Amino acid sequence: MQFLEDPRGGERLWRLLSGNNRPLAMGRGGRGSPQEELAAVRRLAREAEPALRRDPEGRWRWELAADNGPDVRCPGVFARQIDARRAFHRFTQAVELAEITSAQREQR
């Protein structure tokens, strides 16, 4: 899990990358440490069912949210609902093995 720090002190974002550096999930950092945030995302992935949403163009994506917890979403879209479900399954497997890294976001 890569935490992206805003050099201006803004909101911390994170993304979970696959072994080939493709994003599997992304979200906003909470107020806790990166270790606490990773633990919260793992708990959410184990306990919650994803919301599968279809956009106006008919493409699918998954999202997870918890009260006072992390918001997690799929970074891509899929032509079929089953592909979105498979992407969520890949995320749940990868988040259990995730390690923490950090990077700096570009200033805009």
Image (spheres, rainbow, N blue to C red):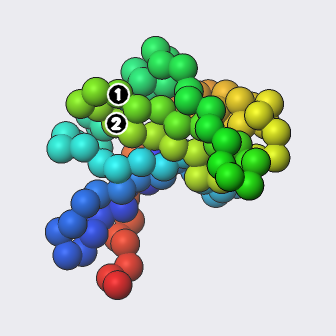
Q: Is residue 13 left or right of residue 48?
A: left
The answer to whether residue 21 of the structure is visible from this angle is: yes
Secondary structure at badge 2 equals loop
Residue at the outermost bottom position: 108
> How busy is the neighbourhood of tag 1: few (under 14 within 10 Å), some, or many (20 plus)?
few
> Where residue 28 sits in the image (x, y, percent)?
35, 50
Please name the residue that numbered disc 1 is placed on: 66
> Where residue 9 sits in the image (x, y, percent)?
17, 69
Residue at the outermost front position: 56
> Is residue 31 positioned above or below 97 on the image?
below
Amino acid at the residue labelled 1: Ala
State the residue in front, 90 or 60: 60
> Where residue 41 sits in the image (x, y, percent)?
40, 31
Secondary structure at badge 1 equals loop
Q: Is residue 12 left or right of residue 18?
A: left
Q: Nearer the viewer, mark 2 or mark 1?
A: 1
Asked if the residue under mark 1 is in contact with the one under mark 2, i.e. CB atoms within 8 Å, the reply is yes
- Residue drawn at 29 percent across, 31 percent down: 69
Please name the residue that numbered disc 2 is placed on: 70
Choose top left, top right, bottom left or bottom right for residue 49.
Answer: top right
Q: Is residue 40 left or right of residue 26?
A: left
State the residue in front, 1 or 14: 14
The answer to whether residue 18 of the structure is visible from this angle is: no
> Is residue 62 positioned above or below 56 on the image?
above
> Where residue 108 sits in the image (x, y, percent)?
34, 84
Amino acid at the residue labelled 2: Pro
State the CA–CA distance, disc 2 to disc 1: 6 Å
- Residue drawn at 25 percent across, 60 percent down: 11
